[in-house]
Image (tube, coloured by chain):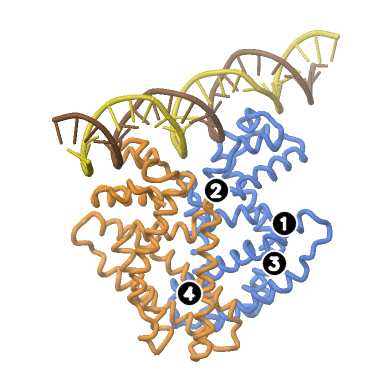
Chain colours: A blue, B orange, C brown, D yellow
Amino acid sequence: MPTETFLNLADEKRQTFIETALKEFADNNYDSASINKIIKELNIARGSVYQYFTDKLDLWLYLKEYSEIQKLRHIQSVDRSKYTDFWTYYEDLFIKGINFDIEKPLCSRFLYRIGYKESSKDVAEYIDNWKVTAKEIFTVWVDNEKNNGSIKKTVDTEIAVQFILSMSSSIGELVQTKYSNAIENNLASEKPLFTESIEEYKRTVKELVQLLKNALK
Amino acid sequence: MPTETFLNLADEKRQTFIETALKEFADNNYDSASINKIIKELNIARGSVYQYFTDKLDLWLYLKEYSEIQKLRHIQSVDRSKYTDFWTYYEDLFIKGINFDIEKPLCSRFLYRIGYKESSKDVAEYIDNWKVTAKEIFTVWVDNEKNNGSIKKTVDTEIAVQFILSMSSSIGELVQTKYSNAIENNLASEKPLFTESIEEYKRTVKELVQLLKNALK
DNA sequence: CAAAATTGTGACAACTGTGTCATTTTTGTT
DNA sequence: AACAAAAATGACACAGTTGTCACAATTTTG
């Protein structure tokens, strides 16, 4: 938890701090991410960081929660009850996801790292929870969709979950690798050449979801 | 490349060295893996390591090559030309894979880390090559199997590759998470309770491959 | 058996990192 | 303006890392 001091900070200063820290933790894994680099980039004293957060882990946990909240806002706009078909829902979830990647690339990259690349022992316990949660959510989904007929009942739930989880990760990786350059450009320039990439991305997602549908329906 | 000195080492000593180093690099990512810990575990002097290898990266590269060769030996025994159906071939590949995980758990875990969890900048370039290679191999496969009718031609090759790659990673992760304890036990005790787990693993792989088949055939 | 080649050693330098804390600076309040 | 509270500072202690190198021990060779 951040201290009062941090929360009382001027909005712009606090935001700059978050962005810079987020960038460091998005570019490096937990062990390699360096508070030294953050304070040099921000031109602030070492002590300040420890007046805002008790330690490195505390900062990391805050950034994690911050990013998750940001992501949730994007995802929440996709409402399952508004879809008759599970698969178009799932599709839209990823297409909404790309908005998140464009608008909050740092959060996106940070969460991507947590989900699939982080391997530090210091944060291992907090990542396990995340994965278990994801699995639980997917399990509820799959069971529901089995009753709706979106997923055939002969498929084992656990295996279907594994399958969907793996696909989700795959789509995530797709964005991070294939479109990371485009996203970087989008950050730098005002009018990026990203619109066409989005269309390409949507096509890819649709085809991948179609394959998932073939497999499970 | 290791030095002559290392290659001239007594077989047992060299092997112990490899195993210990492998364990350190399997348990930690490149940055966190510590030569200090290795030499303490081995009870040898710091200087020795640098008489065997020029530096940390050199050691890592050797372990990578070593592990890849070990893996290749296991995989090579599965010969595509002996299978009329691609999917049973693909299935067997993973079932043979589990043998590798049991017999060479350190190599397996090390390679798993390289493939999916490593994110150190020092070794990034060597990992990219690995992934690109995997993609190339899968692309050739998919194109072949399209002609054989094992994969339908309407599916985009790149997307099919992405799909298969993701599944492969998923199956790999399955072993690492679900069976890692069992593998550890296998290392320690003489007669492990692992045989039943293997059967369960085989069933899971078969079901996952079946799903893949549904999706792509 | 002695000399030469090989292998082992561990203290050391040079970094980089985290977290602390007494002190100074800034801000807010009376 | 004077005082109090809050925030910023950066030198410091301590720990951990890699790679070096002069020297010691061991093995091989002539």
Q: Are marks 3 and 1 in contact (CB under 8 Å)?
A: no
Q: Secondary structure at mark 3?
A: helix
Q: Earlier in the sequence, mark 4 or mark 3?
A: 3
Which amino acid type is shown beneath numbered disc 2? Asn
What x and y, as percent, mark residue B165? 51, 71
C-alpha span from label 3 to label 2: 26 Å
Which amino acid type is shown beneath numbered disc 3? Lys
Q: On the image, which quarter does residue A187 sit in?
A: bottom right
Q: Earlier in the sequence, mark 4 or mark 1?
A: 4
Q: Nearer the viewer, residue B74 or B65?
A: B65
Q: Are marks 2 and 1 in contact (CB under 8 Å)?
A: no
What x and y, as percent, mark residue A213? 56, 81
What x and y, as percent, mark residue B108? 37, 61
C-alpha span from label 4 to label 3: 23 Å
C-alpha span from label 2 to label 4: 30 Å
Q: Secondary structure at mark 4?
A: helix
Say which residue label 4 marks.
Answer: A160
Q: Are marks 4 and 3 in contact (CB under 8 Å)?
A: no
Which amino acid type is shown beneath numbered disc 4? Ala
Q: How many marks?
A: 4
Foreground tag (2 vs 4): 2
**Circle 2 residues within 10 Å: few <14, some 14–19, many ≥20:** many
Q: Is residue B119 above or below residue B179?
A: above
Q: Nearer the viewer, residue A11 or B87?
A: B87
Q: Is residue A63 above or below residue A176?
A: above
Which amino acid type is shown beneath numbered disc 1? Glu
**Circle 3 residues within 10 Å: few <14, some 14–19, many ≥20:** some
Q: Secondary structure at mark 2?
A: loop
Say which residue label 1 marks.
Answer: A184
| Residue at left offset 63%, top offset 45% | A24
Say which residue label 2 marks.
Answer: A29
